[in-house]
Amino acid sequence: MLLEIDDLSVEFPTAQGPVHALRHVSLTVPRGRIVGLVGESGSGKSTLSLAIPQLLAPNARITGGTIRLDGVELLALPEAKIRALRGQRIAMVFQDPMSSLNPVLSIGTQMADIQFRDAALSRRAKRTRAIALLVRVGIPDAARRIDDYAHQFSGGMRQRIAIAMALSGNPDLLIADEPTTALDVTLEAQILDLLRDLRRDFDGAILLVSHQLGVIAELCDDVVVLYAGEIVERGPVAAIFARPSHPYTRALLDCDPGRLAIGADQFPTIEGQLPDLADITPGCIFAPRCKLAMARCHREAPTPVHLAPDHRASCHLLGDG
Amino acid sequence: MLLYSARRIGLALVIILCAVALLFGMIYLVPGDPASVALGPLATPEIKAAFRARMGLDKPIAIQFVTFLSIVFSGDLGIDVFSNRKVSEIVLEALPYTIVLTASGIGWAIVLGIPLGCWSALHRGTWLDRVSGIFAVAAIAVPSFVVALYALLVFAVALNWLPAIGAGEPGHLGDQLAHLVLPSFAIGLGWVGYLARLVRASMLEVLGENHIRTARAFGLSERRIVLRYALKLAVLPTVAVLGIGIGHLLSGAVFAEIVFARPGAGKLVYDAVVTRNYPVVSGTVLVTTTLFALCTLAADLIAAWLDPRVRASL
Amino acid sequence: MSAPVFDHIPIVAARGSTWRRLLADPLGRFGLALVFAIVLTAVLADWIAPYNPTRIAIPEKLSGPSLSHFFGTDQLGRDVFSRVVVGTRIALEVALVAVTLSVIIGGVLGLVAGYGPRGLDNAIVLVFDTVRSFPTIMFALALVTLIGPSLQTVIVVIVASFAPGYGRLVRTQTLSLKQAEFVFAERALGAGAARILAVHILPNVIGPLLILASMDVPVAITIEAGLSFLGFGVRPPTPSWGTVLNDGYAFIGNTPWIILAGGLPLVLSTLGFTFLGEALRDAIDPRLRKDP
C-alpha cells in the first residue's frame, strides 16, 4: 500500500469558530492504481489533496489522524524531510495551469529549477531532460518552445507542461487536483488520453481529484466519494457506477449531464446546500439534503457498511451499520 | 511596449509644455509689469528695457509665448541680476549636489526598506513584525525636515559625531560622505518606512500566489523561493512608486539643503526667493520640474518593461 | 439616498461597529487620544497658554526650561510653551480650511469631468496632471515669489497639492457610476444631470473621498509648518510650529529647547492623525486591510 490516510481531521480557525473541513477521513492508494476522489465544491477535496504533501495554508490545523507513505508517517516528519519528498516522491498537478506556472520565468527555467536535486547534472543536461519530457507530453516543437513563457501557451498545453513537470522527478504518487476542470471538453479528453498513455511508463499511483464523474469514470480504478468533509462511499469504479449505494452517490450520478435522458427538459439537481462546517449537527452529514432520510439519520451518524470486500458506504438504509 | 512608450513620452512632453505655459502665465498674466516680475525689483531700468525688447512685450500674447518657448528651449534661462552669470550655468552647477543627495536618500530607503519589508513578510504576525509596522508608519508620518532638524541637533550639535554644515571639501570623498550621512538619512527615513510597508504587502501577496505554491510543491526551499521567485515580483511595484515619490524626495532635499546649509538646487532657489532673484527662481523651478517629469516618465517605462506580463500585453 | 453599489467603494458599516473596531485597535486608541488632545489644546489654546505668545521680554531671552517657562524662552524672551500651544490652533485651522477647500474644488471638478462631455473631461484632466506634475515645494516657492508669503499662499499650495488627486478619484468613481444600470434607468425616467449627480453619484463618491481627505490632514499640517519654517507662511508675530522651529534653528547653538519644543507637537500631531487615519480606514472596511 503506497498511501494510507487514516482518520484524518483538518480544521481552519475562523472568527466564528473552527471550520471542520475534513472529519475522520480514511482512504488508501495502492501502488500502481488510479484512485479518484469525487465531491462537489466545498467538499474538502482540495484540502485532502493538499494535506498529503502538507501544502495547506498556514492557518490550517490537522487535529487528528495519520498519513503514511510506504509506512512512513508524514505528519511526524520535520519540514526538511517533507520538503525532500515533494516533487521527488509526491508530485502535484493543480487545477489552473495559468496561475500555477510562474509568469515571469520561461518554462525551461522552471523545469530546470525543479531538477535542483540533481546537482550532478549540468544545466544543459537538465534542459535536454526537460525537452524530452515536453515531447513526451505532446508539446510540438518542444526544443524551441521551451524558452517561451506560460502565457504564450494555450490552456491545454499549459496543463501538459504541468504534467511534464510533475513527472520530472519520477514520483511514486501523482496527485492531480482537478486537472481538467479549467479546460474545455476537447482538451479534457486530450489530457485524459495523455494521462492514460503515461500510465504505461509511469508505475506510480495517481490520486485524481475531480467533481466531474465523467473524468473519474474514464480514468480511475477506484473511487472515493467525499461529501462535506466525510467519506460516504468508496469502491472499485465499476461497482460504484453500477451499484451506487449511498444516496449522495446516487444523486451525483443522477445529476451527471452525461446520463441525461434524451428529451429531458430539466437538469436534475441536489436540493439544498452544503452544511455549515463550523457548526456540525449530529447524525448523518447528508441527512438534511437526503430525500430518503429517516428520523434515525438525523440523530445518529452511520458507520461504514461492507457491501463487498472493497466496496463500503455509510448509510443507515444499507442494513444495520 | 513601443506604443505605450510613445504615449507615455507624449504625455510627459505635454506636461512639460504645460508647466512652461504655467510659468509663462504666472509671469506675464499676473497684473503688473512683466519685466519687473520676471527680473525682480533689483533690476535696473536698462535691463528691463532690454528684456522688454527681447521678449517683444508689445506683441500679442501668443507671440510672446512662442518667443518665451523658443528662448527657454534653446537653453537660455536668463541672466542672474546679481552675479551677471547665466542662470542655466548657475542651476547646472547646483543640480549635481541635489541629485547626489536625493539618490543617497533613495539608497537608504532601498538598503534599509526592502530587507525590512521582506523580513516582516516572512515573520508575519510576530511581535517583531508589528513593531516594524508601527515604526514604518511613524517614519512615513513624521515630516522629513523635523527629522533633519532633530538629527542636526543630536548628532551634529550635541554629540558632534557628524558635520553640520556644507557638503564637505571638494575632492575629499570621505569628508563629503560624512557630510552626506545626516541629510540623506533625513530624506530617506520616510521612504524606508514606505518601502518597508509596500514590500511587505507585495511580498505577502506574491507568496500567496498559486505559482509559489507550485514551487513549494516541488520541494524548493522557502529561502530559494523568496530570493529567486518572490523577491523580483514583490519589488516590481516599488519601482513605479519610486517614480511618484521623487517629488516627495525633492521637497525633503530642499529642506535638508537649507537645514544643513548644503549647496544644491534647493538652497539655490530658496536663497533666490528670499533675495527676490526672480530669474534664478523661475529658471530653477523650470529645470527641476522638467527633470521631475522626466524621472516619473522613466520610472513608469522601467516598471512597464520589467514585468513581462505587461510587456507582452502591450 | 441610494445605497452604495460597487464593492470597491468601501461600504460604511453601521457606525456602531466601526467605532467598536476602531477602539479595539491599540493604534486607533493611541491615535484617537493624541488627536483629541491636540484638538482640545487648539480649542482651549488661549486658556492653556500661560503667557501671550507675542509678549516680548528681552531680559528673559533664551533661558532654558523653568517652572515659569516650561520650554524656556526664545530670542525675544517670548514663552515658547505659549507659542507652541497657540500654534496648535493655527496649525489645525489652516489644515482644516485647506483640506475642506481641496475637497470642494477637487470634488466638484471631478464630478464635472466624470459626468460632463468628453472635451471638458480631457481639459480638466490635463489641468489636474499639469498641476500635479509640479513638485510641491517648487510650486510653493514659485507662488511665494509671485504673490508673496502669507497664510493664503500656504492654503493655495495645499489646495494645489490635494485637489487634483481628489478630483481624479471622484472622476473615476463618477465615470464608472455613470455607466451603472440604475443611472440609465433614472435617465430613462427623465432625471436631469443635477438630480443624478446629487442623489445617486455624490453619496457614493463622498465616502472614499472623505477617507482620503482625512488621511491628508497631517500632510496639510506638515506643509504649513514647513513653509512657515522657511519664513513663507504665517506672518510674525503670529506663532506657528514652523516659526518656532525656525527660531530654534537660528539659535541652535544657544539652546536646544526651542527646536525640541517646536518639533514635538509636529511629531505628535502627524503621528496621531496618521495612526488614527490608518486605524479608521481599517475599521470602516476591514476588507481594505492589506493584512489578510
Image (cartoon, coloured by chain):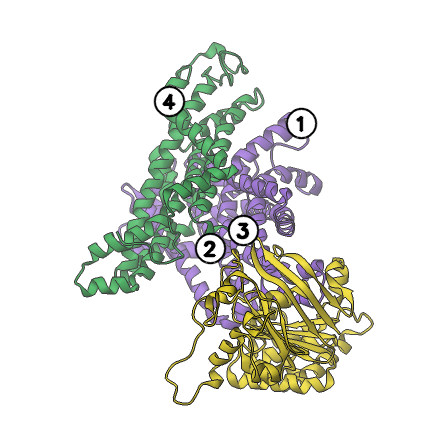
Chain colours: A yellow, B purple, C green
Badge 2 amino acid: Ala
Same chain for the residues at labels 3 and 2, yes or no?
no
Q: Which residue is mark 3?
A: A17
Q: Chain of mark 1?
A: B
Question: Looking at the image, is B40 positioned above or below residue A123?
Answer: above
The reply to whether discs 3 and 4 touch (Cβ–Cβ < 8 Å) is: no
Frontmost of labels 3 and 4 is: 3
Q: Which residue is mark 1?
A: B159
Query: In the rendering, which numbered label is found on residue C44?
Result: 4
- Residues under labels 3 and 1: Cα distance? 55 Å
Same chain for the residues at labels 3 and 4, yes or no?
no
The reply to whether discs 3 and 2 touch (Cβ–Cβ < 8 Å) is: no
Estimate the x, y position of residue B67 in percent, counting from the top left: 35, 56
Direction bottom: furthest residue = A262
- Residues under labels 3 and 4: Cα distance? 48 Å
Q: SS at mark 3?
A: loop
- Residues under labels 4 and 2: Cα distance? 45 Å
The reply to whether discs 4 and 2 touch (Cβ–Cβ < 8 Å) is: no
Q: SS at mark 2?
A: helix
Estimate the x, y position of residue C250 in percent, counting from the top left: 52, 25
